Image: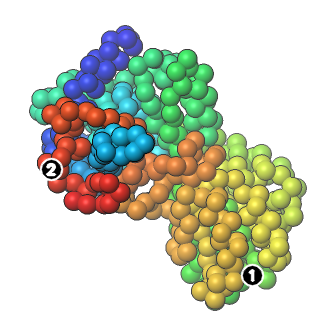
């Protein structure tokens, strides 16, 4: 593999692609979405076969993938996302004249995107990382995930066809296959300007470290998962034990527990612990074991359970019925809050349908748990309005621990839209300032640039007088259109 050739092609494409109008980029993105849907009769069974996920799940994922691509297209057509700011000159100002300054967001350059195993479409070849990078004006060098190679290849062909049909340089998108060494070489190449990754903490942290060891460090936007705690309060849980147990188990076992927002930790008041554990066990016994993505993930799941089974602090509500080569049998253990607080190992994610129930005696114990929590993608609070009103200090603390704070339902299910924040404090991600889902994901792959006293005919359209794009801009301190 000629890495220099791949990146040189991407860099040459970048110098053209970054100046393509938002409307033309939007047309390009819509061609990708249309192309994916045109291949659905081949793509859905192929992705299902390679991932062990049911065709119904893949069908929904295809809709989500096409939908989020079109959402970025709509964002580009409107155009205000570039955050254009204009401060007009004042040559009469004293003691020094004021220059003309104009600022907006410009793309970084070639982006290396790593595909995820658990979403063969929505977080892979044409997933949110690729879509947001392309929308920003950055070419993508995509490193295919080995768990679904043929699916990735077919989606890559759809994107490449859209590149050609849009008369864009071929280097706008490159599909690369290979192992760990290939990924390392892509990150180390001097023309790489950013990295996007969805996967394990070990994988994301190693990429982050590698990128920071370069002579020119580059940002790594790694989404590395979390245990997504649910905190149940006494009144809410007491009045809804059966329904909340059902909701919890449904979220825990969704997709064999292979979601980054899987609720692997739940805090329960001691007064309701036995009743809730009994209700959860009843629900778990109704859940059939589901295939995991591949044998390696199943092996890691049962290895994690074996380590936990050796801990005397844990009391098992339900052990995994079997240790299958591919299927995930759900499991639940409980632990006293004081014991949980003694060992950070109890915060480590188990990728699969396992959860740990922490039994707390009082608010002080619960607050101590909140203080010890690592950074999370999500935290969910189950409480009546009156209970929540008395917990402002706790809510204030928890808001520092996550990217999304839920007050009903369960954390699985990530809405793709304008207000979504899918990211959180370390170690859930490497940069909590950004999201990997929703339109603000585009902000990962841009940087601000200011032009001072630039002639009007050289300015980008977003910064010209008269506002030829008709976008919202901040002009002399006021937001105007």
Coloring scheme used: rainbow
**Residue at the image position 28 percent from the left and 34 percent from the top:** 453
Give residue 27's position: percent from left, percent from top: 15, 44
Q: What SS does tag 2 mark?
A: loop
Q: Give the labeled residue for mark 2.
A: 466
The image shows a total of numbered marks equal to 2
Give the alpha-carbon distance from disc 1 to disc 2, as whole Å.
64 Å
Residue 413 vs residue 465, the one in the foreground:
465
Q: Give the labeled residue for mark 1.
A: 272
Callout 1: 10 Å neighbours few (<14), some, many (20+)? some
Q: Relative to residue 452, is residue 318 depicted above or below?
A: below
Give residue 150's position: percent from left, percent from top: 33, 32
In the image, 368: left or right of 445?
Answer: right
Q: Relative to residue 199, is residue 416 depicted above or below?
A: below
What is the quadrant of residue 105 in the picture? top left
Give residue 471's position: percent from left, percent from top: 22, 54
Residue 38 vs residue 30, the one in the foreground:
30
Q: Quadrant of the C terminus?
A: bottom left
């Amino acid at each position: 593999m000629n890495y220099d050739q791949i990146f040189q092609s991407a860099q040459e494409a970048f110098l053209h692609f970054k100046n393509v109008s938002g409307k033309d980029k939007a047309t390009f993105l819509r061609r990708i979405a249309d192309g994916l849907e045109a291949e659905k009769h081949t793509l859905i069974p192929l992705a299902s076969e390679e991932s062990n996920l049911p065709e119904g799940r893949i069908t929904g994922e295809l809709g989500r993938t096409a939908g989020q691509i079109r959402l970025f297209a709509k964002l580009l057509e409107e155009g205000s996302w570039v955050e254009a700011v204009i401060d007009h000159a004042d040559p009469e100002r004293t003691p020094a004249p004021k220059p003309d300054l104009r600022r907006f967001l410009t793309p970084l350059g070639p982006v290396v995107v790593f595909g995820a195993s658990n979403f063969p479409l929505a977080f892979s070849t044409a997933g949110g990382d690729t879509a947001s990078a392309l929308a920003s004006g950055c070419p993508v060098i995509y490193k295919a995930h080995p768990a679904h190679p043929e699916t990735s290849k077919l989606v890559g062909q759809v994107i490449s066809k859209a590149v050609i049909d849009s008369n864009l340089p071929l280097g706008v998108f490159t599909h690369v296959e290979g192992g760990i060494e290939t990924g390392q070489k892509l990150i180390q190449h001097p023309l790489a300007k950013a990295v996007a990754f969805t996967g394990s903490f070990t994988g994301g942290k190693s990429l982050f470290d590698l990128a920071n060891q370069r002579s020119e460090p580059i940002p790594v936007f790694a989404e590395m998962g979390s245990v997504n705690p649910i905190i149940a309060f006494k009144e809410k849980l007491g009045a809804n034990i059966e329904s909340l147990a059902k909701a919890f188990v449904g979220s825990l076992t969704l997709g064999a527990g292979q979601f980054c927002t899987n609720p692997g930790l739940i805090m329960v008041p001691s007064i309701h612990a036995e009743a809730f554990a009994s209700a959860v066990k009843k629900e778990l016994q109704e859940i059939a074991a589901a295939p995991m993505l591949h044998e390696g993930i199943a092996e890691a799941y049962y290895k994690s359970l074996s380590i936990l089974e050796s801990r005397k602090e844990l009391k098992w509500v339900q052990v995994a019925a079997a240790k299958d080569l591919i299927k995930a049998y759900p499991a639940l253990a409980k632990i006293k809050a004081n014991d949980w607080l003694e060992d950070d190992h109890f915060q480590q994610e188990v990728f699969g349908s396992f959860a740990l129930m922490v039994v707390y005696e009082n608010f002080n114990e619960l607050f101590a748990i909140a203080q010890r929590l690592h950074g999370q993608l999500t935290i969910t609070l189950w409480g009546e309005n009156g209970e929540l009103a008395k917990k402002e200090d706790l809510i204030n603390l928890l808001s520092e621990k996550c990217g999304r704070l839920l007050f009903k339902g369960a954390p699985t299910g990530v809405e793709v839209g304008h207000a979504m924040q899918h990211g959180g404090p370390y170690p859930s991600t490497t940069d909590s300032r950004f999201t990997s889902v929703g339109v603000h994901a585009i902000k990962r792959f841009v940087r601000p640039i200011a032009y001072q006293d630039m002639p009007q005919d050289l300015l980008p359209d977003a910064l010209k007088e008269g506002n030829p794009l008709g976008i919202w801009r901040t002009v002399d301190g006021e937001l105007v259109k």
